[in-house]
Image (tube, rainbow, N blue to C red):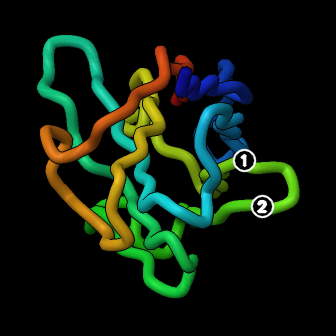
Amino acid sequence: QVRLVESGGGLVQAGDSLRLSCAISGLTVTTVAMGWFRQAPGKELEFVATISWSGDNTEYEDSVMGRFSISKDVAKNTLYLQMNSLKPEDTAVYYCAARRSSLIEFEARRYDYWGKGSQVTVSS
């Protein structure tokens, strides 16, 4: 059984940093592409970042480029999202996702497995 469990969210002030973690069981991070998505209240699910199975290829949504960084620890079988210079508009529930493919992907519907999410709230 595949499980993805996010952690690391919380309430921070604008300009602060947070690191989200996504612990994976039932598959290994070297065999899947993975991504982070977020959903703010009243808004649709939005792509944030994606990383290929090898870790060599990453892509980001424009508004987080240069502030967020996606990575993974193969030994811990864990995906991370380092978030710096947080803004109030980053407030959302953040979800990690995995797809049975080596390629990065921007569309949520192409991911096969999802975590339950972690709340990030940024106050001004």
Question: Given the current orientation, which residue lies at the most extreme bottom position?
Answer: 56
- Read off the residue under disc 1: 78
Q: Residues within 10 Å of mark 2 (few under 14, many from 20)?
A: few
Q: Position of residue 83 (x, y in %)?
A: 61, 52
User: Which of the 4 image quadrants contains residue 103?
Assistant: bottom left
Q: Give me the disc on residue 29.
A: none
Is 106 above or below relative to 24?
below
Question: Given the current orientation, which residue lies at the most extreme right position?
Answer: 75
Which residue is located at x 70 percent, y 39 percent?
A: 21
Q: Which of 90 and 38 lies nearest the eye of the viewer?
A: 38
Q: Position of residue 72 (x, y in %)?
A: 68, 61
Answer whether residue 123 is visible to the viewer in this image. Answer: no
Q: Position of residue 5 (x, y in %)?
A: 63, 23
Which residue is located at x 72 percent, y 45 percent?
A: 19
User: Which of the 4 image quadrants contains residue 11?
Assistant: top right
- Read off the residue under disc 2: 73
Q: Amino acid at mark 2?
A: Asp
**Gap in Å between the C-alphas at discs 2 and 1?**
5 Å
Is 21 above or below relative to 107?
above
- Judging from the image, what secondary structure is the residue with disc 2 in? strand
- Judging from the image, what secondary structure is the residue with disc 1 in? strand
- Quadrant of the snapshot with the N terminus: top right
Q: Which of the marked residues, 2 or 1, is nearer the chain's N terminus? A: 2
Q: Amino acid at mark 1?
A: Thr
Mark 2 touches mark 1? (CB < 8 Å): yes
User: Which of the 4 image quadrants contains residue 73?
Assistant: bottom right
Q: Which of 56 and 18 lies nearest the eye of the viewer?
A: 56
Q: Residues within 10 Å of mark 1 (few under 14, many from 20)?
A: some
Answer whether residue 37 is visible to the viewer in this image. Answer: yes
> Relative to residue 93, is residue 81 drawn left or right?
right
Is 6 above or below relative to 69?
above
Which residue is located at x 75 percent, y 50 percent?
A: 77
